[in-house]
Amino acid sequence: MNDTANKVIKFADAQCLPIGLVSAIIFGIAVPIVGYKVGSGNYAGVLCVVIIFFFAGLKLKTDECKTALKSYKVTTVGLLSILVFTCMLGSALTRAVPLDPVDFKLGMIIFFCMPCTINSGSVLAKQAGGNFASALLLTVMGNMLGIFTCPLLLWLFADLQNVSFPVGSMVWKLCLTVFVPLIIGKLLQELPTSDHLVKRTVATYNKHITYASNALLVMIPWMKISKSVIDGDFQKASVFDMLVVLLWTSFIHILFLILNYGLSVLLKLEVPFQKAVVLVGSSKTLPMALTVLTFLPPDAGQDGLVAIPCIIGHMGQIVIDGFVSSAWAAHTKDSQASKTNQISLPSSPPHEPAVKEEADTAPMVKNAELAESKA
């Protein structure tokens, strides 16, 4: 019983974000009034975003990024994929396909226009045996540049019809709520204190900061969904619509994986760098997508409905990339073991003649010993 409980706790700890997101959806639908009250005025949502990226700045490591700066080819193709190729491919295909409701379609386009994930992409790349420094560099640079690219991409691809889309205003708000807290957190981490108090505290409470970031991230869709239930927007969606979203976002994510793998092979990148480009470059971030929802014009769509495809797409990509990471790590390990065996095989033949010679001379030695004993 203890082993089972430990396994459940370990699983819940590893998958706390997906579990929290699903719980937020269920609780928001079941008891919407709480989330509606907390999220009224949108101040709580903005505060959650600011604290999330402040925590990200506290945990941001630059030493590993410096070692990856030399691999300019990896960085270039990775950033192009994160900010251009995948965004245009996913958004264009989604816009071309007749999907209902319209708010779900908008949510998927918003999700596909985002940069890479902040945490899971680089972690999965590391678990797959990829170059973690390159994965981390792509994550940091991709999210910083994504603040400026995603509003422009949304203006190009989001099917907002006659809705005025404030690109400049959104860039400014993303800078204030994402970039500025990130930089403040990083500067605070680098304070020249004698005992490195901030770094030591962050390292000590690293897990607690992760839990806090996940809790704040879960609160954003919880408030959005609660508001949509109160406003009656959920009557426009069905379970079948959500299943369609899951299948479509998973299909697009697999296309991203294939695209990035093809690019990395075409450029003849080493396998560890391939893993960084594929797993980081194919992912899309949920926090920034939910941040964008906070700044959408009121007539662009219902926030709660628009948030659901972002959450579904995020959870789907985590599951797919988890399998890809494990399978790729196992494949690399088997390949290395096979190469090791092939290298060790040629070393045995040179000893065979010596063994054979020893076997041939054994009868002669024995005959000589018998002759000596007779004498």
Image: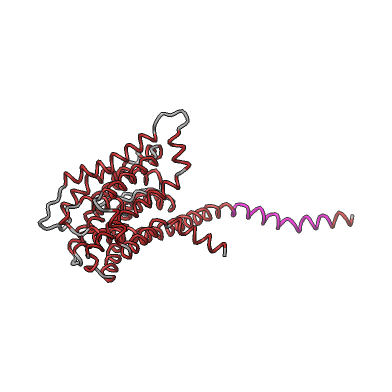
Taking the magenta stretch, the answer to whether it contains residue 58 is no
Q: Which residues are magenta?
A: 348-369
User: How many numbered discs?
Assistant: 0
Q: Residue at x 12, y 52 (%)?
A: 164
Point out residue 23 in the picture as x, y percentages from the top left corner: 37, 61
Given the current orientation, which residue lies at the most extreme right position?
375
The one nearer the camera, 81 or 339, is: 81
Given the current orientation, which residue lies at the most extreme left position?
162
Specify whether 354 is left or right of 286: right
The one nearer the camera, 244 or 366, is: 244
Here the colouring is secondary structure
Q: Quadrant of the N terminus?
A: bottom right
Specify whether 198 is left or right of 96: right
Given the current orientation, which residue lies at the most extreme bottom position?
240
The one nearer the camera, 122 or 349, is: 122
The one nearer the camera, 100 or 141, is: 100
Specify whether 198 is left or right of 346: left
Q: Main secondary structure of the magenta part?
A: helix
Specify whether 75 is left or right of 331: left
Point out residue 296 in the picture as x, y percentages from the top left corner: 19, 52
Point out residue 150 in the picture as x, y percentages from the top left corner: 22, 49
Taking the magenta stretch, the answer to whether it contains residue 355 is yes
Point out residue 63 in the picture as x, y percentages from the top left corner: 40, 37
